[in-house]
Image: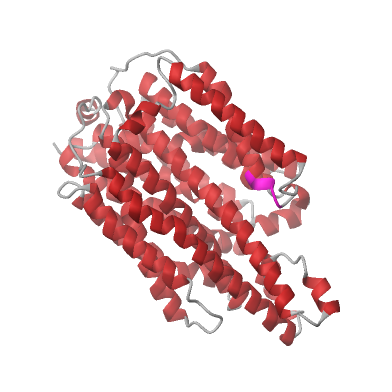
Amino acid sequence: MEAKQTRLGLVVTGLLLGIFVSSMDNTIVATATGNIVAHLGGIDKILWITAGYLMTEMSGMPIFGKLSDMYGRKRFYVFGIAVFLLGSILCGTAQNMDQLALYRAIQGVGGGALMPIAFTIIFDVVPPQQMGKFSGMFGAVFGVSSIVGPLLGSYITDHFGWRWVFYINVPAGIVTLILVAFFYHESRRHVRQVIDWFGVVTLVPAIVCLTFSLEFGGNQYAWNSVQIIGGFLAAALLFAAFAVAEAKAKEPIVSFSMFRNRVFAGANFVGVMTGAAFVVAVVYIPIYVQGVRGGSAVNAGLELLPMMLGSSITAPLGGQLASRLSYRAILFPACLVFSFGIYLLTTLTPDSSTLQLMAYMAIVGLGIGPSFSVGGMAAMSEFDARDRGAASSTNSFIRELGMTIGIVILGVLQKNVFQQQLKTQFAGMARVSSSFANMDPRAILLPQTRAQIPGVILSKLVHALSTSVTQTMVWDLIPAILSVVLVFWMGGGRFRQPATQPAQSNTDAG
């Protein structure tokens, strides 16, 4: 009995590490982009650092999830972590921006397998009576990684150089690879199914076109440019073709019939809204701390810690309660608290205290925690092992898509508000106004830049940035409040023992 527990513990440890490094990746890299451009050049290609990863990660999620149902979890998880490690090492050796973009795309292929398959493995190997506890742990790690990323990225970049932002993945990834490869023994009983190739060849380019348009619109190309409009049109046509393909496929990559299940549909609807609202807070509160309050990147990370602590408490708690209460009974109050926390962020001013901000972030964290753990449980518990990988990957994909769309839309709104505020602040100062009319708000985040700006001008810039951030938080209330409403879509569904757990006995028995 001791050996069984030890083996399960080792596998869970490996999966937790894998989730931590993969979900942290984009946030930890974002803090190093300035240093990367300074060393490699190619500022016109800076968006590819994120876009290259997102395109392949999001494309891979539903595909790897379905393949894991067909041919087994282990081989695709091990493949994913190996490719992720290879991509991380290559990123650290990049000599120009073109190489880095290519290597980030390779890294994203691996990342697309890690998150959804890890959650599925947990459902396969953990006894039902412990499912809440382990789902809570995984949810807490996901939330913590989103917040630790910027703090860790800033520290590593300042003390070791930007290449170590990628190399840091290697030791954790190797440990994950060893633990899962040697201690996870899954069932050989997998149902071989026909691969939906038409779904693959329509889904991947659809995601590429959509990600390209979202990432480059308003940055490298105008929103009304031929490139961006063409990208959106191509994405719409390809997604339509994908929908037709999935409706006809014998074994679709994304089975739309899953959404007839109210619990699964509700979990995805809530996930996309909470994900969008959460990522906006994670991105713009550090901008507020640095640009409005004059703090460093490390200060910004530290002031996010209360959110991390809050989610670390309620994610496991939500998982534990899921075996006793309905999903709605857990997520409704959680989403209310989350929405209240977002509302409090709309009240921030340049004079708000550190204690005030940290208290608000703690409330946001307490509210978002259960969605990390309970949402994934709700999405997967409705299906047996044959479809569980597809259910998990669809849930991860939709949440990731919600985060991407949320940050793009609200990012455009924030930029427009900031530029409008600049015109208001510098009214009657034509020469100064023209100098700052199209200023990137990130420019005043750097201490060296702030030091060169006259005090009177800096005060107006700070006021403009503060207003733009708080108004962005007002818009962020929309997905937060919608999550409260959409919780009711889940009905009275609650966690139930999965119909089959094919891998459990094999894993325990070694």
Residue 195 lies in the magenta stretch: no
* Residue 215 in magenta stretch: yes
Query: Foreground residue, 213 or 505?
Result: 213
The colour scheme is: secondary structure
The spot of residue 308 in percent (x, y) is: 39, 62
The residue drawn where x is 31% and y is 50% is 487
Percent position (x, y) of residue 142?
Answer: 40, 51
What residue is shown at x 71% (from left), y 41% (from top)? Answer: 228
Q: On the rendered structure, is 90 left or right of 473?
A: right
The magenta region covers 214-218
Q: Is residue 332 visible?
A: yes
Q: Quadrant of the C terminus?
A: top left
Majority SS type along the magenta span: helix
Residue 323 horizontal/vertical position (percent): 17, 46
Q: Is residue 95 left or right of residue 199?
A: right
Query: Looking at the figure, which quarter contains the N terminus?
Result: top left
